[in-house]
Amino acid sequence: MPVAIITGASKGLGRALAWALAARGWDLVLDARGRQVLKEVAEAVAGHGGRVRALPGDVTDAGHRAELVLVARGLGGLDLVVNNAGILGAEPLVPLAGQPLDGFRAALETNVVAPLGLLQEALPLLREAPAGAVINVSSDAAVEAYRTWGAYGATKAAVDRLSTVLSVEEPGLRVWWVDPGGMRTDMLAAAEPGEDLSRMPAPEEIAPAFLRLLDRRPVSGRYTAVALLEAL
């Protein structure tokens, strides 16, 4: 069975992707900071698919990243890395004039440095896989100027650029950076308290877009969930 590492897998899109891949028989290595919630998700997911290993920890910790890859190796290899974990840098979001610099540094570390660090650990196994792939979760804030989303958007723009270069440097892999669009998640609720999210899609409604990438294996590039779902 193929093996995937999913970061930020205890809730939101990460959890939805864990469910979706498990249902297809994938073996999973799941990461999140919340030990108890991650344990509950892993136990639930394990009942519907392949083997599941839950590793609570912080992706900004190099030792934790190395352990994620080591566990994947123990499952037989690594076919997919999903860099999904992320933080806002300020909750709620604020204009750049008031953006806490410590929060921005933390967002850069979690949203940009940690994914690169994990990929550096994972690349040897991904290169050995018959169909190695990387999915970096982006955002429309990376390419659109939304008030108060400047700092977070800057981290996602950096992820887009890293992904673009990685796709050139690793032509044997598929590298996809994907804008999932707005979703009914705790992160969006924290970003914009008081906003009505009832009409936003749930992460489970967005997950099929990511499965389409794995099914069709289009060329490396930037994709939006909306476009991928329209093509279903």
Image (tube, rainbow, N blue to C red):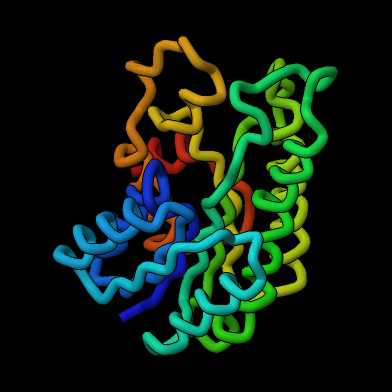
Nearest the camera: 213 or 47? 47
Left or right: where 156 falls relative to 7: right
- With respect to residue 211, does 158 lie above or below? above
The picture places residue 15, in percent across and down from the top left corner, at: 35, 50
In the image, taking residue 222 as reference, residue 202 lies left or right, namely left
User: Is residue 148 placed above or below 165 in the rendered structure?
Assistant: above
Left or right: 206 as drawn, with respect to 86: left
In which quarter of the view is residue 74 placed?
bottom left
Residue 47, percent from left and from top: 15, 65
Q: Quadrant of the C terminus?
A: top left
Examine the rendering and report whether any part of residue 218 can be seen: no
| Position of 192 relative to 85 (above/below) | above
Residue 133: % across, % down? 53, 69
Q: Residue at x 72, y 65 (%)?
A: 166
Q: Quadrant of residue 123?
A: bottom right
Residue at left 35%, top 28%?
201
